[in-house]
Image: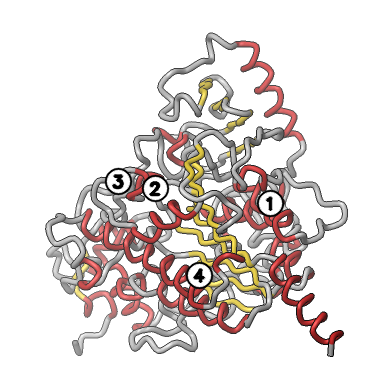
Amino acid sequence: MRLLLFLLVLGTSLHAARPNIVFIDCDDLGFGDLACHGHPRIQTPHLDRMAKEGTDFWSFTVVNPVCSPSRAGIVTGQFPSRWGVHQHFASHEQNVQRHMPDWLDPQAPLLPRVMKEAGYKTAHFGKWHLSGGDIEGAPLPAVYGYDDAAVWTGPGRHVFDGLKYDFASGDASAHDTQAASWISVAATDHALRFIREAKGAPFYLNLWLHETHHLVSATEDDKKTYPDVPEPRRTYYAAVTRADRQVGRVLDVLDELGIAENTLVMFSSDNGPENSHARPGQKFYHSQGSTGGLRGRKRSLLMGGVNVAFLARWPGVVPAGRVDKETALAGVDVFPTVLAATGAKTPEGYVSDGENMLAAFKGEKQTRVKPVFWWWQGGHSGDDWPAFAMREGPRMLILDEMKQRVELFDVITDRFQAKNLATTEPDRVKRMTAAIDAWFATLPKSVDPAMQVKTAPKPAEITPATRLRAFKNWDKNQDGHLTLDEYRNGLAKKDNVEGRFKNFDHNSDGKVTRAEFTGDTSR
């Protein structure tokens, strides 16, 4: 009997020593979109609660200003350029043009796999985007180390599968007006089920929410929180508050099950806010995110594109109510820090680009040793001009493609990047530029053919049903016809847009009805 009691106590203490891990990632959420970050109107009570019960790291940066590479940095602990992931995963043809694979190499070091091997139950619910959504033959989440998964923009089970949402099916995408308002709710439904079914066993959970990526959408009930706010901000604010509610649901179930004190919850965003469009019906009309005054937005290596919210809560370990404005945390630090927090074994031969920042999580002063590097290969207009960047402590060096435009900032004392130190610190500029060059020389310059589909996928068959689905998605104001702007925004390939639009606009009135678009004259 004593031996049995000893084993029971030992088992309980082992679980207590191995914290659960929850990583919640928003999509395109701006640093300034949280009430606790000073937004004057958006209500984020559950994120504010996380900040009060944990630590708010103001100097956290992701390692790319768009989705796929940013997330690859989280799960690998390495700069995404090491794996050829420079922009978001798209169609096979687009990936080829970008010199990218069609999916993240499943042989990369992967945090979920390490956690599974350490005895954790693992799950991923929500956005995937570690491959394109329609790439035939892309590895399933299970190949990356997840016991359970339900996703969008990725292969395998869709988040609406197995749940009772009358409008939804596996075809419902985050670009569908109705689905976009419920897709994060569905992902959270799966997350709560997974947490309950863990039944005391340690777990690692990714919950990657839709908000506030295009399509930004809100139900009429969502909008009731903001009756006096005009569009397009009303829809955006409502979407942020809906995402906040999902965070609250997770915190509540942890409290209900009595495991909050043994769970490290982290919250962040994959990059800064999307650029907004001015006119109703345009693709990003409702994208009204705030950087909190930081320069640049999504797709920019300026701070507004990469300096995003990062909250950590672990009662009794992470200090409550602390705002840390100095620690240079980065997305690649999540991997080694989680290993340190859980005691999971580092994979043999693994070299992280990040650091174990657990001391900083615990409230201790921790100076970063490793630099952070960025390489952005997307467009370079406006605030998206930077192609390379490096952060070393408080200093951040930013270069254009030709390394002719040079800006250097102390991003701790000068978060808004107003004072360029490049001319006053030329030796530092020279040394950091050389470090960027040395890092760049280590990166692969070709794509592993094993990470691409063997043949280009056949174009999807176009039927009246598929045209009808596209029409519903593109008709943003739901007035029963498409304008030229709505048609253009819906297309992936935008060559000869006006001519193709005229082919549908049979009566040349500048609008395309559903019947004209689908060819179904019975409607």
Which mark is in front, 3 or 2?
3
* Residue type beneath disc 4: Gly
> Where's the N terminus, which quadrant?
bottom right
Which mark is in front, 1 or 4?
1
Q: Is residue 51 visible?
A: yes
Q: Measured from the top left, where is residue 372 in percent x and y?
A: 64, 36
Whether residues under marks 1 and 4 lie with C-beta atoms below 8 angstroms apart, the answer is: no
Q: Marks 3/2: CA distance?
A: 10 Å
Give the side of residue 365 with respect to residue 160, left or right.
right
Q: Which residue is mark 1?
A: 337
Which residue is outermost to the front? Answer: 2
Q: Which residue is mark 4?
A: 126
Which badge, 1 or 2, is on the more N-terminal residue?
A: 2
Mark 1 crowd level (few <14, some 14–19, many ≥20, 10 Å Cα):
many
Whether residues under marks 3 and 1 lie with C-beta atoms below 8 angstroms apart, the answer is: no
Q: Which residue is mark 3?
A: 39
Q: Marks 3/1: CA distance?
A: 30 Å
* Residue type beneath disc 3: His
Which badge, 3 or 4, is on the more N-terminal residue?
A: 3
Residue 265 lies in quadrant: bottom right
Which mark is in front, 3 or 4?
3
Q: Which residue is mark 2?
A: 30
Q: Is residue 498 visible?
A: no
Q: Marks 1/4: CA distance?
A: 23 Å
Q: Measured from the top left, where is residue 355 in percent x and y?
A: 71, 43
Q: Marks 3/4: CA distance?
A: 26 Å
- The foreground one among 195 and 423 is 195
